[in-house]
Amino acid sequence: MILSNDRQVIHLVNRISFGPSLGEIARVQKMGLETYLDEQLHPEKVDDAATEQRLSALPTLRMTSEELIENYPPPRKAFRQAQKNQQLQQNMFGGAAPVVRMNSMEMAPVQNRAAMRAEERLENLRGPRRVLVELAREEIWRAVYSKRQLQEVMVQFWMNHFNIYSLKGPDRYMLTSFERDAIRPHVLDSFENLLVATAKSPAMLFYLDNWMNSAPPLHDVETLEHRKIPDRGEDFQREAALRPFDGRRLGGFGGGGFRREAWNRRRERRQAKKGKNRRGLNENYGRELMELHTLGVNGGYTQTDVIEVARCLTGWTTRRPRQTPEFFFNPRMHDYGPKLVLGRKFPAGRGIEDGYEVLHLLAHHPSTARHISFELCRRFVADNPPQSVVDRATDTFQASGGDTRKVLKTILTSPEFYSAPAYRAKVKSPFEYVASSLRALDARTDAGLPVILALARMGEPMFQYQAPSGFADQASTWINSSTLLWRMNFAMMLASQRIPGTEIDLSNITASGGGLNQEDSVRGISGRLLGEAPLPGTEKAILAKLRSGSHLENVNFSPREDRSEAAIIAGLLLASTEFQRR
Amino acid sequence: MAVTRRFFLKASGLSLFGAGVVPSFMRRTAFALPGKMGGGRKVLVAIFQRGAVDGLNMVIPFGEKDYFSMRPTIAIPEPHAASAGDGAATAVDLDGFFGLHPSLASMQPLFDAKQLAVVHAVGSPDNTRSHFDAQDYMETATPGVKSTRDGWLNRYLHTQPEAGATPFRAVALGSRMPLTLAGRASSLVLDEIKNFRLLGTPDPRPFQLPTPAAEEDAFEEMYASSSDSLFSKAAAETFEAIRTLRRIGGNEYQPANGARYPQGRLGTALQQVAQLIKADVGLEAAFADVGGWDTHVNQGGVEGQLANNLKQLGDALAAFHKDLGGRMENVVVLTMSEFGRTARENGNRGTDHGHANAMFVLGGPVKGGRVYGRWPGLKPGQLHQDRDLALTTDFRDVFAEVAVRHLGARDIAQIFPGYAVSPANFKGFLG
C-alpha cells in the first residue's frame, strides 16, 4: 500500500532530515518531493551561511589536531604548567603570586558549579573535554539548524559506520579533524574516497593501531638493500628517526642519524626480549576494515586475508600521535613482499601503492556493495528492509562504482521506501530524537552540557561508543525502561522551559487568537509537531490529562517554568510513540 | 519443572512483611517474592574495577621474595616487617603467603569469618593490552571476539527467564548500560533510587514520601493505550520501577547494624543495591563499576592513589556486608578487572598493563578464608612475557562457578559461547 501524498511528504522529511522544522512540511509540499530530494542530494547548492556563522563561535573547529593538543592541554599538564609559572612568579616577586588550588580527587580547579550559568560553564571547560564538547555542540547545532539536512544525516551515518572511541589516548584531539577532513567532505560522493580518507586519518590509524602496524624488524640487517626496500629517495635519516613508539623522544637529524639507527635496533632487540612494544604486524585495522568498514562480517574473507590486508597497510602511520599527528607513509615499516588478498595477487616491491590498491579492491568488492547498501536501507527504510530494495541499491552501488548519492536516490525513490510498513517504522536514536524535538519547537539552544548529558542518559553518549562497530541502528538499541524515562524527562523539560541554555516559544506552535477547545488545541499543536493528528490513544491520554486540571496543582515551579496547557500538550506529544519514531 | 528448593520457596506465597505495606506490584505478579524473610532469592553483585587494578598490591604475595626486589618503591611491607617502623602499616596477613593491602583492613574480619575468598592469578587468555578491548572481552566473556554485542550476565538472564520477573531482576548502577548487562533481557539502569523519577516534582522533603510528577499518569496512560508494543512494554516497566522506587526511596535510608558506606561512587552504588535487596523488589543481578585503577604513574605503596581507591573499595564492601547482615546468606559479590599490572614497577613509580589479576568473592555462600587458584610465582621464568603475573585460571571459570553454583544457571554453553565450561575447573569457592 502506498502512502497518501501528505504522508509521503512527512515521511521523506522525517527520513532525510532530522525532522521537520517549523514550516518545512509546507515548503516541501509546495516544491514537490522530487525537487526537495534533489536539493538535499546537492548540499553544495544550498546556502548555509547562517549555520557557519553560528559555528564560528567554536574556535576548536578550525584547528588542526596539533593546534588542539597545543592549545588545550589536559588539566594536569596545565596545572603543572601553572604551578611552574606560579613558582616562577614567586621566585620573581617573592611569594605574592595567586594560588592555584587543586581538588586532589579531580586535578582541576575547584569551582562552585551551582553558581554558574550555562554559558559560563561552557566557557570554563578546559583541555580535551573542551575540544570534545565543542565537537558535540557542532554536531547538535548542525543537526538542528543546518539547511543541508541530508548532508548532516549522512555525516552522522558515516561517523557511526567508521566509529572511533574518542577517549582512547590522543584520539580525543584527533576527532575534530576526522569529522571535518575525512568524513564531511565525502559523505555523498564516492565510497572509495571516503574509505581512503578514513584510512589515512591519524584518528583511525591510532584508534585501530595501524600506526604500529609494520613488517617484523630484521634485527641482524644493517642495510636497506638487504631489506629490499627500494630506494625512492625518501629521507632515510628522517624516516628512521620518526619511530611510532618514541612519542616523547625527538628523532636525531643529520649526522646523529646513523648511530641513532643502531641504538634503535639494539633497543628494539632488548624490548622484544622483554615482550615490550613488539614491532610487527598488527591486524587490528585490517580486520575491522573488512569486517566493519567494507565487506561485512559475512563478506567472505578469511584469517589469511586479514593478515595479507594488514601487510598491505604496513607503513601507513602517523607522526607522533601525542604531539603532531599527521599521516605519513613510512617505508621502513612496510612489508615489500608479494601478497595475495581475496584471490588478487599483489606483486612484490611496491610501497604505498599496496595500501591504495587494497582499499580500492575492498571499496569495489561486491560484498561491500551489499553491506553498505544494506546499512543505508536500514537507516532509511526499516530495521529489516525488504530484500528487493537492498538488491536494487546494491546494483546501483556496483554500477556507479560506489556513488553514495546515486545509491541514496535509488533507495529514496523506491516503492519500498514509500510503503505503509515503512511509515514511522524507525525508532529515533537519542541524537535524532533530541534534534527533531529542538527543530519541531524552533528552539534556541546553546547545545550545551544539559543537552549533551541528556543524550548520554538516553543511551548515546557522544563519541563514547568503545567498539569500532558503532551503535547498532535498530529499535532495541535505544528503548529500555531507563532510556524511555529519560526521553520522557527530556520531552517534559524541553516543553516546560526547564533545560538551561535552551529556550522555546510555544506561540510558534499554538494557533494565534486562542479560544480553541481542547481537542482542536491538541490537533493544532500536533499538526505543527507531527505534521498530522496524533493517534487516538495519544489524543485520549492528553485530553484526559487536560481535563483533570492536575497540571495546575503543583505550584512550586519557578516563574520561568511553563505549565500552561500548551506546554503539557507539547511535552506529551514529543514523548508520544509517533514522535519517537520517524 | 523440578521442585527445587528455589521453586518451592517462590511458589509458597508471600513473605512475611511484619508491619510493612505490601507493594502493589505484588498483587499483579506471581512468584515475585522469596518464600521466607531474607531467603530464597539469590543475588549476584558484580563489581568491575575499570582501568586494570594492580592485583599484586591489592592481594600481596609477600611470601614471594622477588616481589620486593621487583618493586623497590611501591612494594607493601610484609606483616611484621623489620623494615617497617613501629606502627607503620604492612600487609594484612591472610594465610602466611598472601596479604591484603593495609587499606583493605576492613575486609580482614570478613576473611577471618570465612565469608571472603580471593582468586589469584586469574584473568583473560587474550593478550590484548587495550583497556577497552579487554573490558569488552571480559564483559561479554568472549575474549578475542569483538563482534559479541551482549554481556554474559544478560545471556544468563535471557536463557533462564523468570516467570513474573519484576523490572528489577537486573540492575546496573550508574548512568549507562554496561556491556555485561546489555542484550535481549531487559535491565534497569539506575544511578540513585531517588533520581529514577519523572522530573518536575519538588524534591521530597525529609521523612515524607515523594509525590508523583503531575504528568506521570498521562504518560503512563498514553503508552499503555498505544499499540506500539516496543514502547508499551518498556513503559510498563518504567512506571512500575518508578512507583516501587518511590516507595523505597521516600525516607532517608538508614543502613542497619551501624554500617557506614564511604562517600564516592562505589559506596553509593552498594547502598542502592542493599536498599533494593532489602526491599525485596526481585533483584537477582546487580552491576556496578568504579574507575581510577590505571596507576601508571605514582601508584604509591602503603599510601597513595591505589591505597585511596582500595580504602573506598574495602570500606564499601565491608559496609555492604554489615548492612545486609543475615541477608548476605543469599548474596555473592564478585570483583573483576580487565587485566592486571606488570610485576615490576616502571620508571614512574607505577605499573603498566599486565596480565593475570586477583578477584574477590564475598558472601554467605562463599567458602572464604582462602586464596584460590594455583600460584604461578614471580621468578624470572614464571612470568608471562617476562613481565606480568601469569594466568592459571580463566576468568570464565570463576564466572561460570558463580553462575552455576550460586544463581543456578543451566544453559552454560549459551552463556559462555566458544568455551568448554567444566565443573572440574571450578575453584571451589562456592563449595
Image: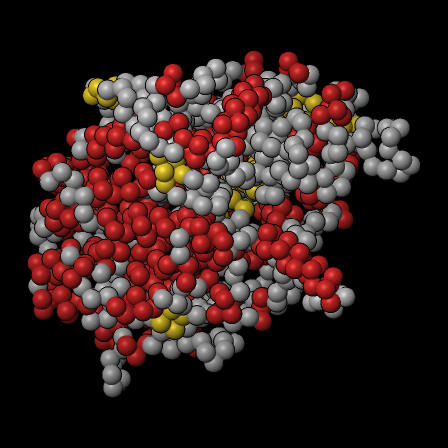
Closer to the camera, A476 or B105?
B105
Q: For the view shown, which residue lies furthest in the front direction?
A: A255
Q: Is residue B169 visible?
A: no
Q: Point out residue A429 in the picture as x, y percentages from the top left corner.
A: 33, 52
Q: Position of residue A525 (x, y in %)?
A: 26, 72
The quarter holding residue A368 reads top left
Taking the image as shown, residue A168 lies to the left or right of residue A312, namely right
The residue depicted at 48 percent of the width and 15 percent of the height is A220
Q: Position of residue A471 (x, y in %)?
A: 35, 43
Position of residue A248 measured from the top left corner of the image (x, y, whole percent): 54, 40
Side (left or right) of A199 relative to B284: left
Q: Residue at x 58, y 68 (%)?
A: A114
Q: Give the left or right position of residue B412, taking residue A153 as reference.
A: right
B32 or A208, which lies in front? A208
Q: Nearer the viewer, residue A194 or B364?
A: A194
Whether residue B74 is visible here, answered yes or no, is: yes
Image quadrant assignment for residue B313: top right
Residue lying furthest right: B86
Nearer to us in this view, B13 or A259: A259
Q: Which residue is located at x 12 percent, y 49 percent?
A: A409
In the rendered view, tell whether residue B126 sits above or below residue A254. Answer: above
Q: Say how many tags the image has.
A: 0
**Residue under the point 54% across and 38% down:** A249
Quadrant including the C terminus of chain A:
bottom left
* Quadrant of the rendered image containing residue A297: top left
Name the colour scheme.
secondary structure
